[in-house]
Image: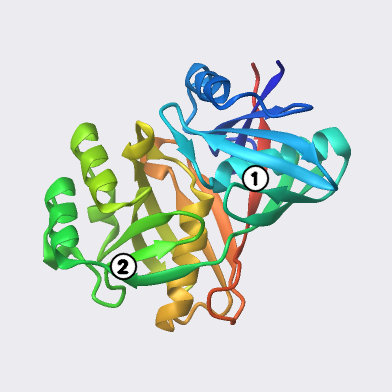
Amino acid sequence: MDILKIAAFSDGDTGGNPAGVLIADTLPPAADMQRIAAEVGFSETVFAAPEGEGWRVRYYSPEAEVLFCGHATIALGAALALRQGDGVFALALKQADITVEGAREGGVIRAALQSPPTRSAPVDEAAVDAALDLFGYRRSDLDPRLPPARIHGGIDHLLLALKDRAALAAMRYELDAGRRFMIDNGFGTVVLAWAEGPQRFHTRNPFATGGVYEDPATGAATAALAGYLRDIGWPHQGHIDVVQGEDMGMRSLLSADIPPEPGSAIRVYGMARQMAD
């Protein structure tokens, strides 16, 4: 099987988050998809097969199936543009129907997704305390303008907003402890964020549930963050830019458009580049 390797949300021809993409006539059995994802070794591999006028899609990390993955969706949009030509493609996920678009532009591809519906809610204080202990932070490190929350844009994430960039750069945690914390509390990932300004954020995204210490670009988390900002009345003016992966040496650039309707889909977009085998 021909598995494409595409870095989503790249900074031109560098950076981005690698994803495996397998487009087939039919989806392989679940056990085979899990095995292939483990062999590819990226944080996610996306599998797609034609269904009606769109595509049936599944996502797998090296350790488990994932309900939604933003960067792998962007990678799929790029792969479909390379295969089918520029267009908007309907995707049937396990729990949602979304779209992704892809357009070739020189040596890179521009891609955009419409996220599943978003929502956010306060998070239990005990979970916040446990997260602070996990990452070595204190309450005084948190930005009071952006209170901790359970945020959702396809999967649930814990959001912790930090007061300064240095605290974000200092993020450290133990992978097994992080996995236990995220599984016990129902978080797919943790989003650590610093607001450089009302429309520009820097984030880091531990993904211990998938066996991945940190993702360099996370479209699902960006969609969830954008929905949260809408929910709390943050002055986003309908758009945010996110820089992720800098502390990993894999600088990635994500953008999100935020419509005013509560809970509505977020358009998350960026560039993608095909990687050498």
Q: Residue at 79% across / 27% down in the picture?
A: 25
Q: Earlier in the sequence, mark 2 or mark 1?
A: 1
Tell me the kind of residue under disc 2.
Ala
Label 2 neighbourhood size at 10 Å, few (<14), some (14-19), many (20+)? many
Q: What is the residue that sits farthest to the right in this orientation?
A: 85
SS for tag 1?
helix
**Where on the picture, by quarter, is residue 213?**
top left
Q: Is residue 248 left or right of residue 17?
A: left
Name the image quarter holding residue 193: bottom left
- Marks 2 and 1, Cα distance to the nearest angstrom? 26 Å
Q: From what the image shows, is residue 126 above or below residue 84?
A: below
In the image, 8: left or right of 111?
A: left
- Assign a secondary structure to mark 2: strand
The percent coordinates of residue 37 (x first, y second) are: 52, 24
Kindly identify the amino acid type of the residue bearing the numbered disc 1.
Answer: Ile
Quadrant in which the C terminus is drawn: top right
- Of 11 and 35, which appears nearest the observer? 35
